[in-house]
Image: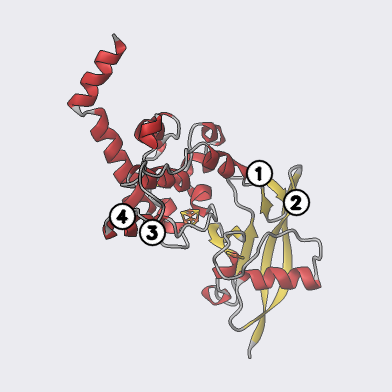
Amino acid sequence: MTSYEAHFKVWRGDPQGGGLEDFSVEVHDGEVVLDIIHRLQATQAPDLAVRWNCKAGKCGSCSAEVNGRPRLMCMTRMSVFTRDETVTVTPLRAFPVVRDLVTDVSYNYAKAREIPSFVPPPGVAAGDYRMQQVDVDRSQEFRKCIECFLCQDTCHVVRDHEENKTSFAGPRFLMRVAELDMHPLDAAAGSGVDRKRAAQEEHGLGYCNITKCCTEVCPEQIKITDNALIPLKERAVDRKYDPLVWLGSRIRRR
Ligand code: SF4
Ligand code: F3S
Ligand code: FES
């Protein structure tokens, strides 16, 4: 096994402020950034706050920014950096810092709660649901999401404009709306839920200008933009210009 000393800069601080601290730390073959953060905790900075759980890229907890790019620390191999490169680890920029590398991601849970859940089709017993394989495949891609919120962190709509948070759900939750709107068995419309209207008027679909940065950082390689956001935009626009919908809205207004 070979090892070397790496130069790390790690952000330390709290909501009142903080800054980057320098560390020289041992790295062994096959290690990932999270291993190094754990070694720092064990040897030099026992009070360094970091959130993690699975160390297998499945819990979505260890999200941070490594050299400015939103990443899972447990899935970022040290071998992607040269040995003389400084590795800078900072908390997710779009969310408020709790301490060190831990951020308060409650914005995301608030957005999740705003989306009405799947409503099963009436008169069909659980276990008797049937849908085409193409619809199953579409849902399964979206359900690979591990809620790491890297896409939420990188989307410029909230990353650069804190004030947009109230009116923009972000790519992860617009993807959820898209999944449900395209789900052939979702019967939410029967209880008055209009997912296309909500996508535009409540979840800020129009703020997305298809930059695809969300898709680039997704560790599950979900094609968020192409398979969820663009289809949802098309469906919402199609509906808006559907002559029957237009006529219905004119009649209702009278
Ligand atoms: Fe993370 Fe991808 Fe889910 Fe976004 S869509 S929260 S990047 S797994
Ligand atoms: Fe943001 Fe993704 Fe749209 S990064 S602007 S939600 S394509
Ligand atoms: Fe679970 Fe990194 S620790 S995704």
Q: Quadrant of residue 20?
A: bottom right
Foreground: disc 4 or disc 1: 4
Foreground: disc 3 or disc 2: 3
Q: Earlier in the sequence, mark 4 or mark 1?
A: 1
Task: Find the distance from the CA under tag 4 to the CA under tag 3.
Answer: 18 Å
Foreground: disc 3 or disc 1: 3
SS label for mark 3: helix
Q: Position of residue 164 (x, y in %)?
A: 51, 33
Residue 193 in sight here: no
In the image, the residue with mark 1 has its CB under 8 Å from the nearest atom of ligand 1: no
Circle 3 residue: 141
SS label for mark 1: loop
Q: Quadrant of the N terminus?
A: bottom right
Residue type, numbered disc 1: Pro
Circle 1 residue: 96
Residue type, numbered disc 3: Glu
Residue 1 in sight here: yes
